[in-house]
Image (spheres, rainbow, N blue to C red):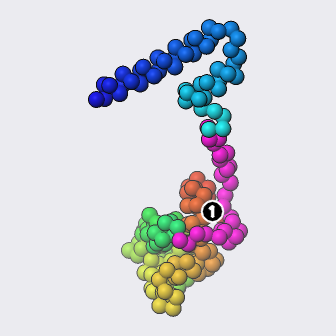
Amino acid sequence: MFQFFKIGIRCVWYTVWFILVVLLSISTVNISALWFLLVILGVVKSKRDTPRPKPALPKPRCVTRNDIDCFSPDYDSDWALGFEYTNPDHSFCKRFKPRQDSELSRGKETCCICIEGYTSSQMVLELPCGHRYHYGCILSHRVSKTEQLGFYDDLKEFACLLCRLNVMKHYLYYREHGWTVDEVPYENK
């Protein structure tokens, strides 16, 4: 059956070429009539049928705090519904254990929730703004806030405790523009 289909396609193709050869051999046919025939037969598409590519917006040098604050996200989007800031796969937060030889584990910086230093045995969560917290502290802070607001409202309202960056808005801004923080860095200014 497929063979008959291939033969039918070839017959149509040869018929089109035969018509073109005959038309080209007639000296009175102008180019626009030939073009019209090609469009009618579907050999070429008219200029109106071909979609014009949208010009890509140039990537900015960086995303600023003002960009995030002025952004109105779609909280019903798939990105928003799958957001979880404690999971690096679903946010731009980083979760790690500091190395023993790093300044972080030497107590040069403290968690602003518990006012204790970081050790190499504790998990640390770094928000997109660069501020860091003990992973356990940020979870317990979220649990207390969830009891007041409700789970999803807590996610929409969760902000860095130091600079008040809305972490979900930050994530949705990048996702809706199709960027990553590696491509377009965030500057908390």
Residue 91 visible in image = no
Our reading of the magenta stretch's main secondary structure is: loop
Image quadrant assignment for residue 135 = bottom left
Q: Report the front residue among 31 and 158.
A: 31
Q: Using residue 49 as the reference point, say whether residue 189 is left or right of it.
A: right
Residue 47 covered by magenta stretch: no
Q: Quadrant of the C terminus?
A: bottom right
Residue 57 covered by magenta stretch: yes
Please give the residue where the numbered disc 1 appears in the rendered image.
186
The residues colored magenta run: 50-76
Hey, what amino acid is under mark 1?
Tyr
Asked if 172 appears above or below 159 in the picture, the reply is above
Q: Position of residue 53 (x, y in %)?
A: 63, 42
Q: In the image, what residue occupies the spot 58% across and 11% down?
A: 22
Q: In the image, what residue occupies the spot 52% across and 88% down?
A: 149
Circle 1 Cα neighbour tier, 10 Å, few/some/many (<14 / 14–19 / ≥20): many
Q: Quadrant of the N terminus?
A: top left
Q: Using residue 187 as the reference point, say whether residue 93 is left or right of it.
A: left
Q: Position of residue 76 (x, y in %)?
A: 53, 71
Q: Secondary structure at mark 1?
A: strand
Q: Position of residue 12 (x, y in %)?
A: 45, 22
Asked if 116 appears above or below 174 in the picture, the reply is below
Q: Position of residue 153 (x, y in %)?
A: 53, 82
Q: In the image, what residue occupies the spot 63% across and 33% down?
A: 46
Q: Report the front residue among 162 and 17.
A: 17
Q: In the image, what residue occupies the spot 46% across and 66% down?
A: 90
Instruction: Name the residue furthest left.
Output: 1
Asked if 50 appears above or below 59 in the picture, the reply is above
Q: Using residue 3 as the reference point, say whether residue 162 is left or right of it.
A: right
